[in-house]
Image (cartoon, rainbow, N blue to C red):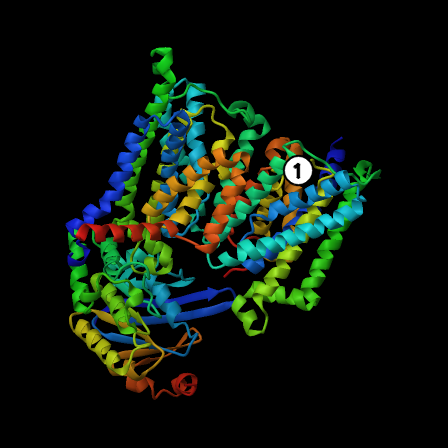
Amino acid sequence: MSEILGCEKVTKRFGGLTALNEVSLSVVKGEIFGIIGPNGSGKTTLLNVITGLIRLDEGRILLDGRDITKLKPHERVKLGIARMFQGMRVFPYLPVYLNVELVARSIYGDVRLARARTSWALTMSGLLPEAGELPIRLTPYKLRMLEFARILVSNPKIALLDEPFAGLTPDEAEAMIGLIRKFNSLGVTFVIVEHKLRYLMRIANRVAVLNQGVKIAEGRPEDVVRNPQVIEVYLGVS
Amino acid sequence: MYVDIYKYILLFSIFHSSTYLTFSLGFSMLFGVAKIPNLAYGSLYILSAYVMYALTTYIGLEPLVAALVAILVAGLASLLIGEVVVKPGLKMPVSVFITTLSVAYIFEEFFRIEMGLRPITLPVYPGVTYVLGVPVSNHWFLILSASLLMFLSLTAFLKYAVLGRSIRAVAESWDESRRLGIDPLKVLRVAFFVAGVYAGATGVLLTPLKALTPTAGWGPLFTAFAIVALGGVGSVTGTLIASFIYGFFEQSMTYVLGSGVASISPLILIVLVLVFRPQGLMGRVE
Amino acid sequence: MVFAKRSAKDLIVGKIPFLIALAVLTLLPLLNVGGFWLDVLTKVNLFLLVTLAIDLYSGTTYYLNLGVSFTFGFAGYSLALLNVYYGIPTEYSMLLAIPISIFFSLAILLPSLKIRGVYFAILSLLVPIIFIGIVTAQPFSLYLGGEGGLRFKQLFLDFARSLPPGIRLTFLQYSYYYISLAAAVVGYVIAYKIGFSDFGFMLRAVGQDEELAEGTGINTLKVKVIGFLISSAYASVAGALYASMRPPVTVDLVVPANTLIPPLTSVIVGGLGTLIGPAIANYLLLLTYELLWGLIGRWRVIAYMLLLIIIITIKPQGIVFKAYVEARKFLRGVFSE
């Protein structure tokens, strides 16, 4: 059991507000790690800190034992951290294949390798027929697949998904679970942030619970949902 | 001798700052409401001055009456610019940049053709008063009191009047104010008119001391730009403080470097401020 | 890739308008269009480079860089200063002025790249204004020529003097025209290659969602800096060539009304980031502007500005590009028959 991603006492303040307060996590290689918590509990901020979009005030981020706290976002992507954003974020006026290829081009120096990886990622996510379309013409599910393709193309060690099931029908969510399981078995570690617990509880090996920027519980899903503190702040509310 | 210079700088930075304040207040309020800088704002300054010039020289109206008419014309012109040029482009700030800039050039070109490049001037409020041993034209006191009055009335208007409060709400958020039952476009109209009046008043007040040419609108526009950048968009207190920083800096530089370089030295200050504090001195951190 | 391939017919049809325009512009001087129009076309050719400079950077990233006229004018002033104070012939000082102007534009405007939105536009507009202030202000105006400008020998003047008096002016006009045309054609082809390369699409990605671009691995700062560098290079080349042909250099080169508004208008009317649209608009609008001179004299500025307001207000953006796409569809229809 070796750690792939570690957060050590991560603290982030916005003005007078503490968004993250000494949050520590240890994600093990090959697992599916869930982060849950009510709205505004700091889940997305934590992902932003891990990907480097937000500078943290205190603490360290480790990838494979290496301190990456000072690295820029694009450098972290190169080291193997891929991210799916909340709410289907794509480049709306670039065709589907370019949405993926630009990521590949910024990671691989070689153009042909980038193109090959792009074709592969589009095939895996079933987007080849729509490759030349603009994203505005895609269904929500296909948009999610586009984001998934963007993750695959960078050949990540660890993929951070921010609410991957939001806006999907039950069938589509099942397909998404299938894809996550498949690439997990191929060696990709997943960190999944979810507001809804239904799907996450099925695939996560371990879950951490955030509330108001503080980690209040961590453990196996079935243990966590029985934790009285979690029931009070999270399940009790919803 | 040196004491005199300090007195001079202090006095005249207060006088100059008060004109920057009135002019920038309208610009700042409009910027806050429309979220887009109105580059035609400087034209209202020259428009009101030229209108007053025409009324006093050709028709022979009393200066006070002519001034009031000229200010009203500037307000209406501003309203028209808002309706015809700014409103259709609200969703695309770049195009408003171009269209308001075009309006500014239309005014400049029109007065160039009609009035020529020869500087004109307006009647000065007569008399000189000695303050701390420094001779000051009474016209400066007229400007100072008018500016003070305009500043206080705008502050009161924004704070207590229903319309003024709507202006602040719209500047805060268009969507929120719509939810509160405010029509942002109506508020925008009011903001345009008030801004036009403030620009027009500055033109009428300041032209007697500074000669006016068709290109005279640009200087005040960039000053307003700079002050708003320094003080934060839509912030009345910020505009007040920024105007005085600007005026003091400019006046001191005039005595250190001579009037040529001094006029641009505040702009350089603004660039530095923007680079290191993009939200302005008084602006909030997002 | 399969979906990126274009058919041979597409390529031919796509290049036809470009080749026709090239042929017309190449042959036009031979039709004896007159010195005035040759001068105008020379100017319009060089302004194409400024239009492309704006479209390549601001049209893709939506960072509105209004400092382009500073870069343009700074190249002109560098050229004049090298010529006047160091005695370097115009032909060489023109070439030296380009890197100098690029360097200063980057040095001055780069720190502002972290500023977003409308503040960046304001800041970049202040730069040419400050430059004008410096050039016309007391101590500096003595060295920089002030309002009257800096005089120097225009491009090829020494060579022209060795020619018979009757053809001197003609030689200068024709050589300037073809230099400007060559610069416009090369500039356009390179801009097209850059604009529709992976790098060009990265610029667009930054414009469409900068945070997403950063978070998915694009080095946004590097992309913006390189984009800015290319844009400045275009404006510098245009400025150096333009100034070398029309001494003296004056602040007119930097005044936004002269060297910023016309190209910026072309970019907006032409269609942001489409390159072909702004290029066509550049010729249409600037030639219209000159035609108005003959029709209504000094009212042309007002008429032109009114026309602009009407076009932009009614059809906010990209009217020329849309017309071009329609024309190509029509052409393709004709060819497939």
- Residue C15 percent location from the top left of the image: 23, 44
Q: Chain of mark 1?
A: B
The structure residue drawn at horizontal position 58% and vertical position 37%, both measured from the top left corner, is B264
Out of A4 and B254, give the one closest to the viewer.
B254
Name the image quarter holding residue B120. top right
Left or right: residue B212 versus residue C145 is right
Residue type highlighted by circle 1: Ser
Q: Badge 1 is on which residue?
A: B252
Name the spot of residue C201 as percent of width and height, x first: 29, 52
The residue nearer to you, when weighing A49 against B154, is B154
Residue C278 appears in which quarter of the rendering? top left
Residue A135, how many percent across, how many down?
29, 64
Q: Residue at x 28, y 31 (%)?
A: C26
**Dot 1: element:** helix
In the visual, does A63 lie left or right of B34? left
* Residue A126 figure quarter: bottom left
| A125 in relation to A73, above or below | below
Residue B24 visible in the current orientation: yes
**Seen in the image, is C111 located left or right of residue B30?**
left
User: Would you call the spot at circle 1 few (<14 residues within 10 Å), some (14-19), or many (20 or more)?
Assistant: some
State the residue at coordinates (43%, 55%): C315
Q: The N terminus of chain C lies in which quarter of the figure?
A: bottom left
Q: Position of residue A166 (x, y in %)?
A: 33, 76
Viewer-nearest residue: B232 or B76 = B76
Asked if A206 appears above or below B52 in the picture, the reply is: below
